[in-house]
Image (spheres, helix red, strand yellow):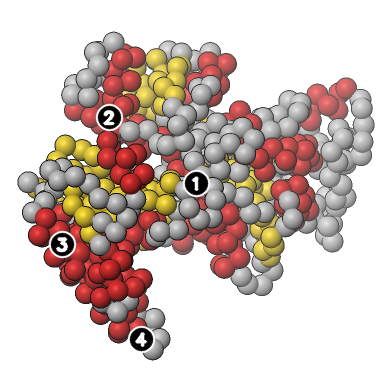
Amino acid sequence: MDKHDFVIRFAGEGGQGLVTSADALARAAAHAGYFVQTHSTFPSQIMGGPASSQVRISTTPVLSAGDGVDVLVALNQYAYDHHHDDLNPGGVTVYNAEEFDLPEGGNYFGVAADELAKSTGNARAANMVTIGAVAHLIKFKLEEIDGFITQRFTRGRAGDDEIIEANIKAVRLGVDVATTSGFSVGQLQPPNPPDYKQIVITGNAALAMGATAAGLDFYAGYPISPATTVLIWMENNLWGEKRFVHQVASEIEAINAILGAGFAGKKAMTATAGPGFSLMSEGLGLAWMAEIPLVVANVQRGGPATGLPTKSEQSDLYTCLHPAHGDIKMPVLAPGTIEECFYAAALAQNWAERYQGPVILVTEFGLAERGENIRRPDLSKVSQESRATVSEGDTGKRYDSWDGSTPLPGMPIPGGPGAYVANGSEHDEIGDTTHLPHHHVRLMERRFKKLDLLGGAHYEIENADADVIIMPWGSSKGPAREAYNRLREQGEAIGWLYSVALHPLPEEVLSVLKSGKKIIVPELNYLGQWSALLRMEGFDAESITQYTGLPFRPVDLVVSIRDRIGAGVTA
């Protein structure tokens, strides 16, 4: 039976090459012209512990990790016991016959992958044996896998040919075992490649690339899951004259370092996760009060405290909007796809420069480590905005009252003209400390008025005349969109509303919210944070929540949305 997509999951223990197997299959499929998306879940220890990594291969763009699994590769008994219930009807398990055995009669067969790999002369080719078995089950063209192997291991080193030959042989051995089993899960339809160039990239890499494209020249970061790979990308790529990358000793040092860099005129950024973001509270308050441009990316994970370091959650939204004490509401961008990670990171840099203040870029584990093929970004189309700076003859009143009717006063840079005073206490027009009420009133109004300068974020509005509108945010966008599409195909009169910018919201999005529609928000947290914030603004909103550490399944959202709109419960 022809199918337009398959989900293949590799499950076992951390350190068994699960992520490598899923990534290899994803890249081979992407090279063949398919759309792919990977999803991994693993414990926080370096080695061991239950883990899994999967890839969804489709003839159309992939919106989510899917509803179930078509092929399960179980490397130990625990993996089989805890994942086989996720198999779709007709799904097949390939199990590690050297680790455990299963009784006859089920939809499964064993593979002695390690033993077969050794017979090729390359004991490390065991994952290619299982990939061969999977390829047979979905009737994936072997020449595409051969091409991936050749490209992957052609490195200009002695022995490359032998490694390529052994891996291709390992694939064929896996195919032989699967052929003998007699199982198949269907025929993967031919690909329908897009007419544009693509790259396979993770969310964190796209985020780092977007920030760099917008002119980032100073990055300081502390390793913390799941933001560490942003720091690693910067260390490997943010090179060149007047660019600086440094691994600091704590998140407090990170926020203070980029505060100093922003004060000195640099485009500065750090990335962290919830625990580190909490430590940055005081520094973010200073950046807001002193009006210093900088960007902090909060790659969310499960919380509170250490929580779930390697799982996904959307539970830092309250904190991101209001990270410091007092009257403060940060600009927040929350991309929902890998491609949006690139452009949102670029926009965050430009926002910081445009309004002269801190910007929060909020993503999550579900985007950070996900791999996906996206349209190759056109770097020439990414703007590089720079803050207004003072010139000779400036009055020195950077902190003068401002109502938006004139250009924002320039920022003085140390070493240049002007009085470069940045004060965390309330201050007068030139930055000197004052406790006079009228200064606090006018500068409070100035700081919030500057948010009107922020626009240009991507948003989506469809069927806005419907009585019920789905409004996800962040990584819940994909599963929600898939559920929305299914419901529309089934005749449900629902609408769609989505914005990368959560604060300030685009005027077009606000217009829909103000129309009095019922807003349903799928989000990965317990409190229903985004719907609560919408209700605070007077909008009729409620959440569909999940807090398992895993992404939504579209089939579950279909049921939940139907239940909320009173249309019965069917998938």
Which of the 4 image quadrants contains residue 357? Answer: top right
Task: Quadrant for the C terminus, please.
Answer: top left
Earlier residue among tags 3 and 2: 3
Please state which of residues 322 and 434 is positioned toward the viewer in this rendering.
Answer: 322
The spot of residue 168 in percent (x, y) is: 23, 74
Q: Three-letter amino acid code at disc 1?
A: Pro
Q: Residue at x 84, y 61 (%)?
A: 415
- Judged by depth in the image, the label closer to the viewer, 2 or 1, is 1
Earlier residue among tags 4 and 2: 4
Could you tell me if residue 292 is visible in this image? yes
Q: CA distance from mark 3 to mark 1?
A: 31 Å
- Judged by depth in the image, the label closer to the viewer, 1 or 4, is 1
Earlier residue among tags 1 and 4: 1
Q: Residue at x 81, y 36 (%)?
A: 400
Report whether 256 appears left or right of 315: right
Crowd band around label 3 with a 10 angstrom C-alpha radius: few (<14), some (14–19), many (20+): many
Q: CA distance from mark 3 to mark 2?
A: 33 Å
Q: Which residue is mark 4?
A: 159
Q: Residue at x 7, y 46 (%)?
A: 1
Report whether 439 appears left or right of 553: right
Q: Which residue is mark 1?
A: 43
Asked if the residue at tag 2 contacts the one at tag 3, i.e. Cβ–Cβ closer than 8 Å, the answer is no
Q: Three-letter amino acid code at disc 3?
A: Val
Report whether 385 appears left or right of 425: left
Q: Which residue is mark 3?
A: 177
Q: Which residue is mark 2?
A: 555
Q: CA distance from mark 2 to mark 1?
A: 26 Å
- Judged by depth in the image, the label closer to the viewer, 4 or 3, is 3
Please state which of residues 107 and 10 is positioned toward the viewer in this rendering.
Answer: 107
Report whether 164 appears left or right of 371: left
